[in-house]
């Protein structure tokens, strides 16, 4: 079922986090297992719309727009760390009184998931499984775009102001093997511009530096995990494609890896049926 951006917003809710409104959606039977979806940069929870209806049949599905993204608050004074975003996910779970949950994450969301996994190792927070889509799990294999590197520079604030619709289109044409629909691209543009979201892009992008700083913690969380892990990867992703999977096999292992040919950085949008099949196959055996 195709859920438009307008419908996505209308069917959403808000909760309070540190005095700011955070947008989220929750769907499915509350008595079924909980599944937390964590989106990537620079988009929002709408990324999951192609999987939402199917996943809601089997799970209580939860997804938030993290602070700085989508329909959530974007205060300019905040320090948008990965730790903060992990705090938001835990706050939402507490808001919904959910103690145990599965995770499905993508891109920036992978790093948030790695921080949650590290916390789970320190003191159980109820993670039952973790599935990761294309993301910079290892800083040594992450190949950021020039635009991302420019955002991280001292001129990042001005770079974000110059991020035009033309640049958006060329970026997604580069990172996605399968062409995205016009509705998708217009939706992404709306989400990024909502409440002047580009004004905090240069703060959000600092996660790339954090990945290097906390590599031992976040890669170690994967290596030492007692939680079942699954990797679903679009192979033709110039940022975190097949080259990242090679490193994953070296450091984490061969179990539960699905590589999707002719799919780029957004497998949940480019090949949602294949992602759904791989995810269901993984959960059926863990």
Image (spheres, rainbow, N blue to C red):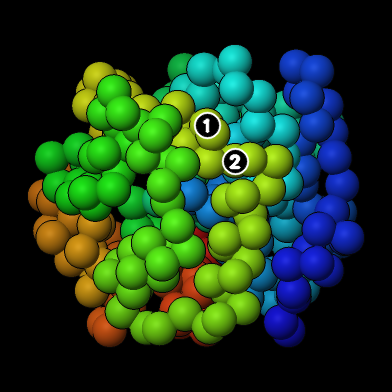
Residue 6 versus residue 212 in the image, above or below: below
* Left or right, 100 with reference to 197: right
Residue 111 versus residue 82 in the image, above or below: below
Q: In which quarter of the image is the N terminus?
A: bottom right
* Left or right, 271 with reference to 46: left
Residue 178 versus residue 158 in the image, above or below: below
**Between 112 and 279, the one nearer to me in the picture:** 112
Q: Residues within 10 Å of mark 1 (few under 14, many from 20)?
A: many
**Residue visible at 51% across and 24% down?**
80
The residue wearing badge 1 is 200
Does the image show residue 279? yes
Instruction: Check disc 1 and report its element: helix, strand or loop.
Output: helix
Q: Report how many numbered discs are placed on residues in the image.
A: 2
Residue 188 screen position, x and y as percent:
57, 62
**Between 191 and 238, the one nearer to me in the picture:** 191
Query: Mark number for residue 65?
Result: none
* Left or right, 85 with reference to 271: right
Residue 233 screen position, x and y as percent:
32, 66
- CA gap, disc 2 and disc 1: 6 Å
Instruction: Check disc 2 and report its element: helix, strand or loop.
Output: helix
Quadrant in the picture for residue 95: top right
Residue 261 versus residue 218 in the image, above or below: below
Residue 27 screen position, x and y as percent:
82, 60
**Residue visible at 42% across and 62% down?**
168
Does the image show residue 233? no
**Residue visible at 85% across and 40% down?**
14
The residue wearing badge 2 is 197
The answer to whether the residues at label 2 and label 1 have Cβ atoms under 8 Å apart is: yes
**Residue visible at 42% across and 30% down?**
157
């Amino acid at each position: 079922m195709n859920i438009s951006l307008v419908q996505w917003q209308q069917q959403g809710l808000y909760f309070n986090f540190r005095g700011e409104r955070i947008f989220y959606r929750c769907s499915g039977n509350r008595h079924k297992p909980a599944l937390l979806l964590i989106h990537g940069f620079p988009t929002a929870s709408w990324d999951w719309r192609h999987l939402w209806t199917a996943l809601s049949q089997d799970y209580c599905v939860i997804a938030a727009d993290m602070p700085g993204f989508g329909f959530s608050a974007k205060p300019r004074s905040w320090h948008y760390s990965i730790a903060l975003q992990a705090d938001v996910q835990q706050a939402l779970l507490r808001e919904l009184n959910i103690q145990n949950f599965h995770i499905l994450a993508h891109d920036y969301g992978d790093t948030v998931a790695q921080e949650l996994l590290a916390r789970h190792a320190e003191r159980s927070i109820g993670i039952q499984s973790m599935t990761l889509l294309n993301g910079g799990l290892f800083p040594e294999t992450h190949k950021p775009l020039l635009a991302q590197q420019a955002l991280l520079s001292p001129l990042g604030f001005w770079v974000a102001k110059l991020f035009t619709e033309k640049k958006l289109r060329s970026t997604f044409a580069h990172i996605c093997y399968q062409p995205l629909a016009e509705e998708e691209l217009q939706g992404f543009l709306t989400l990024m511009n909502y409440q002047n979201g580009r004004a905090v892009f240069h703060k959000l992008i600092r996660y790339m530096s954090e990945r290097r700083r906390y590599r031992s913690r976040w890669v170690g969380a994967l290596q030492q995990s007692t939680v079942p892990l699954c990797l679903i990867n679009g192979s033709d992703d110039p940022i975190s494609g097949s080259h990242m999977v090679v490193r994953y096999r070296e450091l984490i292992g061969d179990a539960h890896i699905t590589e999707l040919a002719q799919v780029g950085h957004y497998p949940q949008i480019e090949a949602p049926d294949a992602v759904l099949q791989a995810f269901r196959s993984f959960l059926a055996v863990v």
